[in-house]
Structures are given as structure tokens and as C-alpha cells.
Image: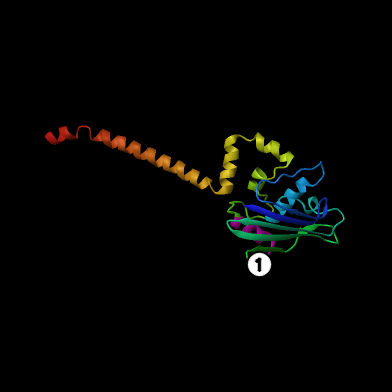
């Protein structure tokens, strides 16, 4: 996956902001509160929606509408995703609006859950389609908030590997290997049993 550009309106500390990503390694540098985490949160929102976060954690204070546009490439496909945050004027609740996904020249107008399903398909992530579920891969490999880092590091190695295997669809191969090992052992045990039953076969033939 290649990051190309990110555009934000009324996202946390950004009234308007555009980030261009160049090929290679990108370094986000700045003082505390400069907006480094906001950039990563905006990318996460563009790809997967709010997940288990509330809209007011992303929408800029005193704003009624937020917008994120993210351009990226995957396996030769040029993609652009647009997501909106809209505040309800009556009760102040914040919801996601209709989303737009462009893949090369094809444009799709989708709901938050539909666009997440489409993006997971593009990225080949084996993750929950529920729009309220956060992306495990993104949180493990790209952006891990400090408060979550301790939890992840406190898990044992096998638990972390199991999570990543499941997210990437590798867990199925692990189960297949384990099943194949069990079957091979059963065949070996059966072979030994049958071998024992035939040790005196020549003597029986002579008799």
C-alpha cells in the first residue's frame, strides 16, 4: 500500500490541511500538539471509519462538518476515498455521512459499512466488517496510540502472532498445518500397528 496524499477539513487541530506523501519513508516531526497523531487518525478514519471511537474525538470543536480525502495505491489500483463527519444540530451527536470511493476510473457512493467492506477487500485484510470495529492491522503496524501500546506489549508473543495471523488470513494455514500434523501422526501410529501385526507373516505362510 502506497500513501499518496491526505486532505482534511475541520479534523481536530486542522481547519484545513493537505499532506503529500513521497515514495519511500515518511517522517512526521513536530512538537506535542502539532498534529502528528491527527494525520494518522485521519488516515485510519478514511480507510476504516470511526471504529470504536466517537465522532467528537475527530471533529474539530465548534464545527458542524468534517471531511477527509485520502489518495493511495494498492497493487496498481489508484484509489481515493472521501468520508464526512456531520453534527446533528438538535442534539449535537456526530455521525458519518455518505462516502465516496474511486478505484481507477470507477466511482462508488457507499454507506460507511459498505465502503469499509470494499476497502478491506482491496487491502485483503481479514477483519470484521462492522463499522464500529477498529482495524487491528492498522493499530498494530501503522498507528498505535500510547495508551494502547502498553496493552499490546503486555500480551505474550503467541497472542500477538495469533491476532496478526487472523487479520491477514494466515490463521487458516496454521490450522491446516496443525491438522495435517495430527493426521500424519495418526497414519504413522496406524502404520506401526499394522507393521506389528505382520511381523510373523512369513512364519504363518510357511505353516
Look at the image and tell me whether residue 140 can be seen: yes
Residue at left 70%, top 42%?
A: 144
Position of 105 relative to 26 (above/below)? below
Position of 154 relative to 70 (above/below)? above
Q: Which percent across, then down, holds residue 197?
A: 25, 35
Pointer 1 residue: 107
Q: Which residues are magenta?
A: 107-122
Residue at left 70%, top 36%?
A: 150
Whether the magenta-drawn stretch holds residue 119 is answered as yes
Give the farthest residue toward the left: 207
Q: Mark 1 falls on what kind of element?
A: strand
- Give the prevailing secondary structure in the magenta stretch: helix
Q: Quadrant of residue 140?
A: top right
The foreground one among 181 and 91 is: 181
Q: Which percent across, then down, holds residue 71?
A: 68, 58
Q: Quadrant of residue 204?
A: top left
Amino acid at each position: 500500500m502506497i500513501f499518496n496524499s491526505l486532505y482534511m477539513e475541520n479534523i481536530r487541530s486542522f481547519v484545513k490541511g493537505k499532506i503529500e506523501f513521497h515514495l519511500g519513508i515518511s517522517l512526521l516531526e513536530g512538537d506535542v500538539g502539532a498534529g502528528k497523531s491527527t494525520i494518522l487518525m485521519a488516515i485510519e478514519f478514511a480507510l476504516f471509519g470511526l471504529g470504536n471511537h466517537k465522532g467528537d474525538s475527530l471533529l474539530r470543536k465548534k464545527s458542524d462538518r468534517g471531511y477527509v480525502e485520502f489518495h493511495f495505491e494498492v497493487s496498481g489500483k489508484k484509489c481515493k476515498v472521501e468520508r464526512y463527519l456531520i453534527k446533528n444540530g438538535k442534539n449535537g451527536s456526530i455521525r458519518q455521512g455518505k462516502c465516496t470511493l474511486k478505484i481507477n476510473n470507477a466511482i462508488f457512493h457507499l454507506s460507511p459499512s459498505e465502503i469499509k467492506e470494499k476497502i478491506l477487500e482491496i487491502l485483503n485484510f481479514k477483519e470484521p466488517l462492522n463499522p464500529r470495529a477498529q482495524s487491528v492491522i492498522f493499530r498494530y503496524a501503522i498507528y498505535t496510540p500510547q495508551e494502547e501500546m502498553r496493552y499490546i506489549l503486555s500480551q505474550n508473543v503467541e497472542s500477538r502472532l495469533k491476532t496478526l495471523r487472523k487479520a491477514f488470513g494466515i490463521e487458516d494455514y496454521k490450522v491446516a498445518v496443525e491438522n495435517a500434523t495430527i493426521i500424519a501422526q495418526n497414519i504413522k501410529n496406524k502404520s506401526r500397528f499394522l507393521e506389528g501385526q505382520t511381523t510373523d507373516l512369513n512364519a504363518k505362510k510357511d505353516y
